[in-house]
Image (spheres, rainbow, N blue to C red):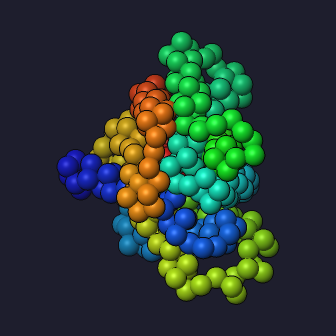
Amino acid sequence: MTPRTALGALHIGALMFGLTGVFGKLAAASAAVIVLGRAGFAVIALAGFAALSRRTRWYSLTLKDARSLLISGGLLAAHWVSFFVAVKVAGVAIATLGFASFPAFTVLLEGLIFRERIHFNEGVLVMLVSVGLVLVTPSFDLASQATEGLLWAIASGLTFSLLSLNNRANAGRVPAVQAAMWQNAVVALCLLPFAAPQLSSVRPLDWLWIGLLGVLCTGVAHSLFVASLAVIKARTAAVVFALEPVYGITLAWLLFHETPTLRMLLGGALIIIAIVVSSRLASSPAPATVKLDAAH
C-alpha cells in the first residue's frame, strides 16, 4: 500500500464510520438489537480480514489480557448502546456531535486516573468542546428530545473515553484485529440477554442495515484503519478521522433532511477543531491495540 492509497483508505474508513448513525437510524430496531447484530457481523468480518491478511499474528491471551478485553468489551457495549439511543431520540447530527466530546473527557480523565498535569492547550481543548456542546444544544429543556438525545450522546463520548483509557492502561501484545474481535464478541454476549426476545420481530430489511453496520462500519473500517497505519503516521490518521462527524452530519442532511442550524454548525466546527487539536497533542504514536479506539 502506497501513502496515497493508504490516505484514500483512511478517508473511506472515516466515511464508513460516519455512516454508523445513518444505518442505526435506518434500522427500525432497538439499540440493543442493533448493537448485538453489529458486534456479531463485525466478528465475522474481522475474522475474514484476519484470515486473508498475511500480517496477522495470533497470540495466546494471558489472564491480564482477558480481563482487559472483558472490560473493554463492556465499555464498548455501553458506548454503542448510548450512541444508538441518542440517534433514535435526537437524530444522527446531534448524536454524532455529542459523541465527539470524547477528547475533552479523555483529557480530564487522564489527569485524574494517570495523575497527569493538564496543560494550557489541553484546557483550551476542553473549553472548545464545552462551548461547542452548548451551541449544539437547541434548548436546555430536559424534557425535549434534543436535549435528552444529546445527554445520551455525551454518555457515549464518556464511555468511549473510558474505553480508550482502559486500552492505554492495559496495552499489551494482543494484535489490533484480534483485540477488536474479542471486544466485539464480549459486546454480543453482553447484549444477547436483552436483545434475544426481540430478534424474532426484526424485519429482513433491518438485518440488512445492521449487517452493513457490522461489516462496513466496523469490520471493513477497522481493517482499513489498521492497514493504513502501516504506511501513514498515527497523527495523520487521527486528523483524517476527525472528519467522521462531517461525513455523518452531511449524510444525515442529505438522507433524512436533518438540516443543521447555524448555531449547530458553529458548535460542530468547534468540536471538530478540538478533535484535530487533540490528535496533534499526542506526543507519540499509540500501540496498535490502542489505535482501534479511533474506530467508532
Disc count in the image?
A: 0
In this picture, is 235 found above or below 248?
A: above
Q: Quadrant of the N terminus?
A: bottom left
Q: Residue at x 52, y 18 (%)?
A: 124
**Residue 180, image x, y percentages:** 56, 59
Q: Nearer the viewer, residue 11 or 186?
A: 11
Q: Residue at x 27, y 48 (%)?
A: 7
In this picture, is 109 found above or below 294?
A: above
**Residue 52, image x, y percentages:** 38, 73
Q: Nearer the viewer, residue 190 or 208?
A: 208
In this picture, is 187 found above or below 72?
A: below
**Residue 103, image x, y percentages:** 55, 34
Residue lying at the far top of the rendered structure: 120
Drawn side of residue 258 relative to residue 133, left or right: left
Q: Quadrant of residue 31?
A: bottom right
Drawn side of residue 65 relative to residue 21, left or right: right
Drawn side of residue 218 relative to residue 8, left or right: right
* Any part of residue 241 in sight: no
* Any part of residue 209 in sight: yes
Q: Nearer the viewer, residue 37 or 7?
A: 37
Q: Residue at x 75, y 41 (%)?
A: 142
